[in-house]
Amino acid sequence: MKKLIRFALVGSLGFAVDAAGLLLLLALTPLGPLSARAIAMAVAMLVTWQCNRLFTFGASRRSMLVEGFRYGSVGLVSAVVNYAVYCGLLLTMPLLKPLAALVLASMAAMAFSFFGYSRFVFRR
């Protein structure tokens, strides 16, 4: 249960990085909501990897390169789920705000990512 709470805290930080990055990119660049979200997600994934390895799960016994590859693999699949839901929501509901779509999409991907990270990446 402690790991799940820590994972939720790190996920909240990742969500904040993702949301802030999305909003900044939309406000400061000519990027649209789809490409801005892809960049914001990549930055958030790097932040959460380091926080999960230091705070939630602890470093695995694997090399950082292998651990990073595994984290990236699970993160990429989770990000695809997240991004697909995000795009689907924006494309089917054009009046929906990008931030609202981000919230819904992030919730959809959270369970998958916890299972993948705890079983595949940081399992001792």
Image (cartoon, rainbow, N blue to C red):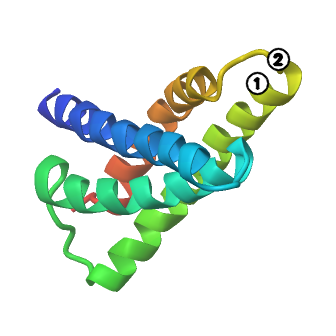
Viewer-side residue, 105 vs 59: 105
Question: Label 2 is placed on what type of residue?
Answer: Met
Within 10 Å of the Cα at label 2, are there few (<14), some (14-19), or many (20+) other Cα atoms?
Answer: few
Numbered-mark total: 2
Q: Is residue 112 left or right of residue 57?
A: right
Task: From the top left corner, tell me how far across and down residue 31 is, in percent.
Answer: 70, 54
Q: CA distance from mark 1 to mark 2?
A: 6 Å
The quarter of the image holding the N terminus is top left
Viewer-side residue, 49 vs 19: 19
Task: From the top left corner, tell me how far across and down residue 107 is, in percent.
Answer: 50, 25
Within 10 Å of the Cα at label 1, are there few (<14), some (14-19), or many (20+) other Cα atoms?
Answer: many
The structure residue drawn at horizontal position 43% and vertical position 60%, both measured from the top left corner, is 43
Secondary structure of the residue carrying numbered label 1: helix
Secondary structure of the residue carrying numbered label 2: loop
Mark identifier at residue 45: none
Viewer-side residue, 93 vs 106: 93
Question: Label 1 is placed on what type of residue?
Answer: Leu
Q: Which residue is mark 1?
A: 89
The quarter of the image holding the C terminus is bottom left
Q: Are marks 1 and 2 in contact (CB under 8 Å)?
A: yes
Question: Which quadrant would residue 82 be assigned to in this image?
Answer: top right
The residue furthest right is: 92
- Decide: is 18 above or below 67: above
Q: Which residue is mark 2?
A: 93
The structure residue drawn at horizontal position 87% and vertical position 21%, both measured from the top left corner, is 92
Residue 66 visible (yes or no):
yes
Residue 78 visible (yes or no):
no
Task: From the top left corner, tell me how far across and down residue 86 is, in percent.
Answer: 69, 33
- Decide: is 110 above or below 51: above
Question: Which quadrant would residue 3 be assigned to in this image?
Answer: top left
